[in-house]
Structure formats: structure tokens, C-alpha cells
Amino acid sequence: MDRTAYKNRHIKEHYDRINFVIPKGEKDRIKKICSEIGASVNEYLYMLVCNDLADGTSRMAEKKQGFNAEQERMLEKWQVPRKYYEMM
């Protein structure tokens, strides 16, 4: 087995892969930040996820807990369908 095949097999056995899709141009911004802090893009994104989940919850989950009464009234006034509430 050659070196590349060995590395690919090792990665497949020991790591999970997540595809991450972002708008054009954002990759360059992320790479620039990574080079400034001396980290790879993978290290940087993994660190962000770990920091977000450090206390066992996510800040994104906190945002998804719903709207207060005033926000609900505004959305109803604007006639925003409930199916779009989760996106906000």
C-alpha cells in the first residue's frame, strides 16, 4: 500500500467529514483570518464549533427558542406565515 492510500484509509477510519458550503468570497476571508492567527481553516472552524458547544448547548439553539409577545404581534401584523418563523 502506498503512502497516499494509507493516509486516506487512516482518515476514513479515524475522522468524520463535514462538507461546508459558503458564499463566494468568504473562503478567502476565512483563509486570511486563519493565516493571521497561525491556524488551518479546519482548526479554525473546529475551534469555533467547540467553543460554541463548550457548555453543552449552542448559541444558535438559544436564538431558536422563539419570539417574545411583542415580536409575535409584529410578525402577525406583517402577516408572516408561521412556516417561516424557524428561519428567523
Image (cartoon, rainbow, N blue to C red):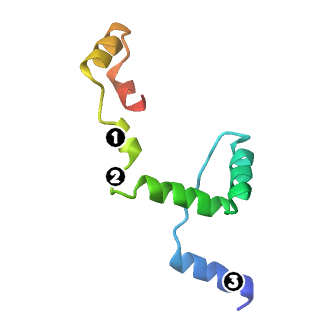
Q: Extreme top residue here?
A: 77
* Residue 3 horizontal/vertical position (percent): 73, 87
Q: Earlier in the sequence, mark 1 or mark 2?
A: 2
Rate crowding at label 2 as few (under 14), some (14 to 19) or many (20 or more) other CA atoms within 10 Å.
Answer: few
Q: Earlier in the sequence, mark 3 or mark 1?
A: 3
The residues tagged by marks 3 and 2 sit, at their Cα atoms, a distance apart of 38 Å
Q: Earlier in the sequence, mark 3 or mark 2?
A: 3
Q: Residue at x 46, y 56 (%)?
A: 51
Q: Extreme left residue here?
A: 69
User: What's the residue type where badge 3 is placed?
Assistant: Ala
Above or below residue 22? Residue 38 is: below
Above or below residue 23? Residue 11 is: below
Q: Residue at x 30, y 26 (%)?
A: 67
Asked which quadrant contains residue 17, the reply is bottom right
Q: Residue at x 59, y 52 (%)?
A: 20
Point out the frontmost of discs 3 and 2: 2
Q: Extreme front residue here?
A: 37
Mark 1 secondary-structure assignment: helix
Say whether residue 35 is left or right of residue 60: right
User: What's the residue type where badge 1 is placed?
Assistant: Glu
The residues tagged by marks 1 and 2 sit, at their Cα atoms, a distance apart of 8 Å
* Residue 65 horizontal/vertical position (percent): 29, 36
1 and 2 marks in contact (CB < 8 Å)? yes
| Location of mark 2 (residue) | 57
Rate crowding at label 3 as few (under 14), some (14 to 19) or many (20 or more) other CA atoms within 10 Å.
Answer: few
| Location of mark 1 (residue) | 62
| Location of mark 3 (residue) | 5
The one nearer the camera, 46 or 15, is 46
User: What's the residue type where badge 2 is placed?
Assistant: Thr
Question: Which quarter of the rendering shows the C terminus?
Answer: top left
